[in-house]
Amino acid sequence: MERSQGMMSLDKWIACGVAVLVAACEPASITDAHNQLGAGRKDTLHFTIPITQDSFRIADFLSKTDTLTTASGVVGVKLDAESVKVNVGQQLKFNNLNFDPFSFGYGQMLSVSPVSTGVTLPSPPAPTGAPGAAAPPIAGVTTQPPARFTTAQGSTLVSATVSAGFAVDSIVNNTTCTATNISLAINDSTGAPRANFPLIASLAAGGGLKVDSVTLAAVTVSGFLTPVANASFGVCVPTGSLSVNVFFRNRPSLAQPVAGLTLASVTLSNVNESFTSSYSALASEARIQAVDTVVVSSGTFTITAQNRLPVALTDTLTLNGIKKAGATVVAVLTVPAASGTGTTTSGVLNIDLAGATIEPTNVNVAVKGVAKTAGQATFSPTVTNNAVLVGGTGNLVIQSLAGKLDPTKTPELTVAVQNSTEMPSSSVDFGDFGDAVKDSATHLNDATASLTVRNTAATPLALINFTLGAVQLDAAGNLKTKAGGALDYEVDAAGQPILVSIVDPGKTTLAIARSATTSVALPSAPLIDRVVHLVLNKTRVAIVAAGNAQAGDAAQSRIISTDNVAVTFALTVGLDFNLPLAGVAFTRNQAQDGASMESKDADEIAGRIINGGVTASVTNGTPFGLTVNVAFVDGTKDSTVDIFTTAGHVTLDSVALAASTVDAQGRVTQAAVTNASITMSGAQARPLLGKNFTVGVRIRLKPAAGGRGAIRPTDQVKIFVRALLDVRGGAK
Amino acid sequence: VNRALAAAALLLATPLAPLPAQAVPDSSQAARTYSGYRRTPTFRFDPFRHSFTPAWGFVVAAGGAAANNTFTLADEEAARLLQDKDSLGAGDVLDMLGLVPVGAGLTGHMTGGGSFFLGGPLGSHLALGFEAQGDAFGSFKLNDSAVALIRDGNNSRPDFSLGDSHGSGLVTASAGAHLLIKFGSIGSIDGMRLTLGGGYRYLRPVIYGYGRSSITNGGRIALTSDSVIARIGLESDYTVDPETTARNGKGSALDFLVRAEWPTAGFALEAMVANIGTLTVPGVERRTLNLNVATTSIAALNEKKFRPSVGDSVSIIDTLELHVKDTTVLTIDLPRIVRFTASEWANSILQIDVSATLPVTGEFATPLAVDIGTTWRLIRTIPLRAGLVVGGSEGIGYTGGIAIEGRVLYFQLSGQSLGGLFKNAKGGGARIEWGVFF
């Protein structure tokens, strides 16, 4: 036990030996340790560290990714599409529709048909004188009421002057004696004879008949007419009677048909005359006749009636062919009494047709006029001829039109439309090209408006003289106008409005089939150039679509008020422009992996750099001159950080390139290449040795000879920058 | 290296035991050296080491040697110190790579083992020994082309490769017998004495590991300023369960020796071929890694990409790991040893041995090495040894040792400093042997 305590075990001996060796080998200090490891062969390590190697497509400098290649092969920037909707349907109107004039007379009041009247002469009394002496004449006994005259409508004649007509008598001697010296007169209500029949010298007994007539022309009658007859029988004592009947006819016979007297003037009482007639009020309006159905959004027919009658007139108009809520439109118009001298009074009636459905070809206005007065009124042809004149006009805003819509027959199918939409600044974004494009010296040489025109109507539409233009907006957002109210379009250098006509290729109009969409691409460089400049310079501007829209093609179709034409214009700007002299600068940051050293190691290696250099190879595949600056800084920086101003950044000398060779259209035909080398100190190379570093690349495009450059999708700047570092190793 | 250092420390620290009485030949000066100790021990693999024991007995031995061609003990300590002080920087790494010999790459090798021997002479013409031993072999090489990636920089050459870079290790346990047949003197009493030796060992593998490039010529790595190209294939084979491997693996090795000795002239020549055989190693897990990328930046290696088949997103870097391919049974060739030795002892005091161990190629590579050793028997039973090691990849080495060569007791302690002395050594070795003869 004691021995064991006194002797070291084997592992302890080994540990002791190792400790002795280690103690003998261990450096005295860290510096000695470094020197120990660095005492070997002197090496120079040649490292290449890529600083940046990338291809910068010029198109990538655009903030928008929505690009395309234009027909001319350059990069096209698609501005945000905007739409202008013109409500064609709302513009459809029928203004100043004229009713065909219509008149009717009240001649009926000058035509009276009196009740026939007559008298009977009773059997003559026995002679009272000497036998054989002649008996005195016998007066007739009225056996019928007087003849009173009435119109067909029942107006009562107060007095009248006959212009034409006859009184026809029929005398029958049914006595047993021959009647002689038969006289017959017609007296009016005043008792004055107004007509005298010829004296009948003798009329045979037993049915002798005598018919005569007498004209009543120019006879003025008051009240009624009643016959007054006398006859003699001599000494013969008759039995039976002699009847006298008087008829008032328009001809001197009793032949049928029977018609009354025609009056030159008449004074009637209890007038209640009506007259009914109808006519095609819109027959002369070909523009509406060409449409099968018109549904009215709003509007009225204004009916005007003129009245010559000295009595008030009530006209009831039934507008057949025009319905509201399924019922034919009926309107009543009252026209006051005229003076009776031939002048007229007027009445106006507005018929609200909102919601009405009109079938123009079926429009027939039935007019029922009623002239009515409780008093007396005198009528003459002066007032009864064209006693009533009916006319009218209409202004209709259309809800819908249906039929074989034919703009050649219905000019109203061609409407002027206009609408606008402001070009928002957000839709015009050229990224880093923005400053260059907005420069007044920069002009876009390639721009296209791709229009998508959508027709919601179930009828073909044609846009006529339809243009896109640009009009600045005032502070209130209203389109600026010139004196007189016309839109103040943006103009070109010659002072002419910059307008893009929206037409089909090779045509003067743009046709859109019913309920269809059509597209057309139109070169619009001047307009878009102007709009882009205004927007980029923060001037509010609107794209104005204006022109005429024409509906219909004579085929069956329909258009409603909500139908519209929506013009969506997608503006594409080809990057073909003249750069300003100052050029355009783009800056991009790229995070790069460094030599992946810890900071301490990187510092140490940086201190060992014997030689440092940077080689840059730049290929200019753009139509512009080029200056490239490269800077880098330790660590990963955000893309928004300006590496060129970040503390600790290292800036390398710039590399300049001439512009590439371009063709007549400004497109690159031969890329330019250059190589440059610069020296770099160890301290400058320090950021490259860390875990990562951020490279800032600034590319400035400068105008080439001629100034114009067209950027194709393939145009790019290739930059290959690498650091060559010679690092010392060993030989301390 | 540490093991070798430990052995060396043990050598220096172990107190010497009392020396027993010892018989000394008294014929010629040369013949006065006890024949049983004329065959000088070596640090290298020698299966016949104890077959020449002067009497029946047993010997227990252990030792090993390891070296590299680049780093000295001072270098290693400097690196360790800097590492401990958190001061090991990239510049130090550059400096360390500057230590790697240009064109040679970084190489290293080691052997080691322990054994128990029981045997002795059977008359004057035979000797028989049995031994049980464990042996370890290892080597590695980092091809100069791979080292150059950092040493020369990526601007100095277009591409790099792993070349024949590899690493290997094998631990075996074996048991066997060796027989010596001694002839002579041939022709005269001073004639040559010829010894023919042969042996057989039954081996069991314990640990096996091997890593190498699976692509011919080591693939290609190119880190240019505008591209990163790598076509690399790695394969590693190793036994994951030594117990299972030892239980199920087996192999056999044959050793042959021919030695011609002129005792009275004090001269001997020897040729030995050892470790002829194969070893079947079961339970070897094979892992592979294949990388075939071509990108424009290192950053691209870290970019995660979606894998539809797996449903995850990984980067190339994420996939850089060895994947188990299979578990297999390997049959490997044992590291064959061919050595020629010449010994001269003109008197009983000094013996000079020169041996050349031919290089071994393959999985367990070792370079050509020439050992020049001297044995000083100023005290006949306590020889002192000193020598040089020439060749190898590490440079000149120095050996030294002391022994007790008694009739019933044998003890030896030796050490070597390879590539330089002490702190400048790039390797070392140590060996201890102790035997008792009946």
Image (spheres, rainbow, N blue to C red):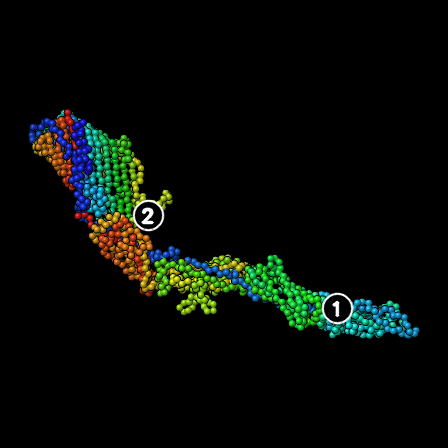
Q: Look at 72% across and 68% down and name the residue there.
A: A269
Q: Farthest right residue?
A: A131
Residue A185 image point, x, y percent? 80, 73
State left or right for residue B189 relative to residue B232.
left
Q: Quadrant of the C terminus of chain B?
A: top left
Per the rendering, the mark at residue B303 is 2
- Considering only vertical position in the picture, is B158 above or below A363? above
Where, by quadrant of the figure, is residue A223 drawn?
bottom right
Q: Amino acid at mark 2?
A: Glu
Q: Position of A572 compared to B11: left or right?
A: right
Residue B12, given in percent of the width and then of the height, sits at 14, 34
Foreground: B196 or A691? A691
Residue shown at 7% from the left, 31% from the top: B29
Q: Nearer the viewer, residue A416 or A144?
A: A144
10 Å neighbourhood of mark 1: few (<14), some, or many (≥20)?
many
Q: Quadrant of the N terminus of chain B?
A: top left
Say what secondary structure mark 2 lies in: loop
The residue positioned 15% from the left and 34% from the top of the image is B13
Report which quarter residue B73 is drawn in.
top left
Which residue corresponds to mark 1? A149
Number of numbered callouts drawn: 2
Q: Are marks 1 and 2 in one subunit?
A: no
Task: Please determine whether, in this image, residue B258 is positioned above or below residue A556.
Answer: above
Q: Is residue A114 visible?
A: yes
Give amino acid for label 1: Phe
Give me the chain letter of mark 1. A
Distance CA(mark 1)–CA(mark 2): 119 Å
| Residue sitting nearer the eye, A369 or B52 | A369
Above/below status of A532 relative to B293? below
* Nearer to the camera, A508 or A40: A40
Secondary structure of the residue carrying tag 1 is loop
The spot of residue A448 in percent (x, y) is: 41, 61
